[in-house]
Image (cartoon, rainbow, N blue to C red):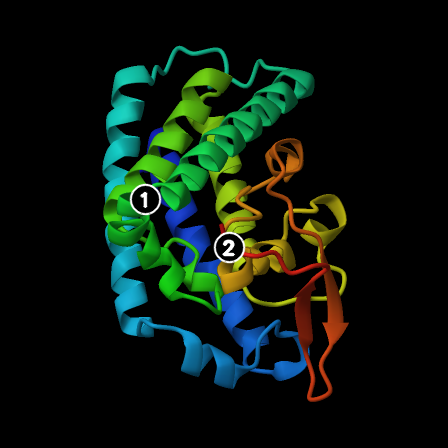
Amino acid sequence: MEVKISDEFLGTVAPLVVYWIYSGFYVLFGSSEKYRLHSKKEEDDKNLVSKKTVVKGVLLQQAIQAVVAIILFTVTGSDESPTTNGSLSVFDLGRQFFTAMVVLDTWQYFMHRYMHQNKFLYRHIHSQHHRLIVPYAYGALYNHPLEGLLLDTIGGALAFLLSGMSPRASIFFFSFATIKTVDDHCGLWLPGNLFHVFFQNNSAYHDVHHQLYGTKYNYSQPFFNVWDKILGTHMPYTLEKRENGGFEVRPVKVVKDD
């Protein structure tokens, strides 16, 4: 008996599975100091939350994400859609993906920035994510459930709806977005990493934001850093090798808190 797996099911489950598989890949590289942006000791000493708590928090967010995806596909999905039958051109798919990237980046930049500027929201919601002063791969989606819903889940839903992509296309887009988010938080600088070639918004760029001197800068995620540059929240940095191995991200100039 042939078992048919729907695009809606894969669109819901694939990004969740990809998250843990890709994170596991970076955990292996993180066991060595060679590629780390912070030493293992810094990770253990500076972070304010246990890895067990991080895993629980991520699983909770992924459960919420799955429920919203199921509702979204139920309301909008259709087996008769032209995209399901694969009739869209590569150009159309590229346009949908680019539109979704712009929508997701725009939503996350302004929501993320507001959560830093609003003291109540930062103290009670967004500060949970910043307990990871030294980010690592599977902590990428560790945050307050409300923040996960507002930034990631609703942002993803808007990107899906406004781009007009099909459930099948969403499998690939949200798996890619998940990989990019994990990469931004991996705390590593790997040679030959294509994300560092094609995106200025990368693991070093986002590491700046997780440090005390950079919490009001480099808000952009997950793809481009355009909004930071347009609105004056871009903090340039240099990447230098540490004597004991690995790399260190240093701001070009340290700015004072407002």
The x and y percentages for residue 156 are: 41, 32
Q: Tell me the kind of residue under disc 1.
A: Gly
Q: Would residue 190 appear left or right of 182 to someone viewing this image?
A: right
Q: Which mark is residue 257?
A: 2
Which residue shows up at 24% across the image and 53% down it? 60
Q: Position of residue 97 (x, y in %)?
A: 58, 27
Image height of 182 relative to 170, above or below: below
Q: Position of residue 12 (x, y in %)?
A: 34, 38
Disc with the residue nearer the chain's start (1 vs 2): 1
Closer-to-camera residue (191/44): 44
Determine whether label 1 and label 2 are within 8 Å by CB.
no
* Number of on-image labels: 2
Helix, strand or loop at label 2? It is loop
Classed neighbour count for the residue bearing mark 2: other residues with Cα under 10 Å, few (<14), some (14–19), many (≥20): few
Q: How many angstroms separate mark 1 from mark 2 (CA)? A: 27 Å
The N terminus lies in which quarter of the figure? top left
Q: Which element carries disc 1, helix, strand or loop?
A: helix
30 sits left or right of 74 in the view: right
Crowd around label 1: few <14 · some 14–19 · many ≥20 (10 Å): many
- Determine if residue 4 is in view: no
The location of residue 167, given as percent across then percent down, is: 42, 26
The structure residue drawn at horizontal position 33% and vertical position 18%, both measured from the top left corner, is 77
- Residue 177 visible, this orientation: yes
**Label 1 sits on residue:** 148
58 lies left or right of 135: left
Q: Is residue 184 above or below residue 199?
A: below
